[in-house]
Image (spheres, helix red, strand yellow):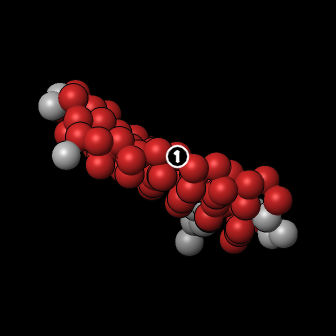
Amino acid sequence: MESSLWGVGIFLLVNAFLCLYRAFRGPTVADRILGVNIIGTKTLVMLVLLAFVFRSRFYLDVAVVYGLLNFVVTLAAARFLETGRLKEEWKRC
C-alpha cells in the first residue's frame, strides 16, 4: 500500500512540474494564477499523502493551514486581477 502511495506522490510531483511550466509560460495572467493554484492544491494532496504514509497528524494540520492560505491568496489574486486593487474604498453617504 505504501509503495502505491509513493507512486501517486511521484506522479503528482511530475504533474506539478507540468503545471509550473504552464504558470511560467501562460499566455494570460489568469492562466498563470490558475497554474499556481493547481500547484498549491497538489502540494496539499502531497501533504495528506505524507500524513498517511508516516501516520502523523502533524502533516494534516499543516495541510489544512496550507489549504486555507492557498484559498485566500487565490481570492486576493483574482480580486486584484479583476479590479486592479486589493482593498475597496468605503464611501460615505
Image coords of residue 58 (percent x, y): 22, 28
Other-residue count near label 1 (Cα within 10 Å), few / some / many at <14 / 14–19 / ≥20: some
Q: Is residue 14 above or below residue 30?
A: above
Image coords of residue 34 (percent x, y): 62, 64
Image coords of residue 54 (percent x, y): 21, 29
For this rendering, which residue is in front, 37 or 92? 37
For this rendering, which residue is in front, 27 or 92? 27
Is residue 77 shown to the viewer in this render? no
- Give the left or right position of residue 32, taking residue 27 as reference: left
The residue at the point 84 percent across, 69 percent down is 27
Q: In the rendered image, which quarter contains the C terminus?
A: bottom right
Q: Is residue 46 above or below residue 21?
A: above
- Give the left or right position of residue 93, taking residue 25 as reference: left
The residue at the point 66 percent across, 56 percent down is 18
User: Quarter of the image holding residue 33?
Assistant: bottom right
Looking at the rendered structure, the kind of residue marked 1 is Leu
For this rendering, which residue is in front, 46 or 64? 46
Residue named by callout 1:
13
The residue at the point 64 percent across, 49 percent down is 17
Q: Is residue 54 above or below residue 79?
A: above
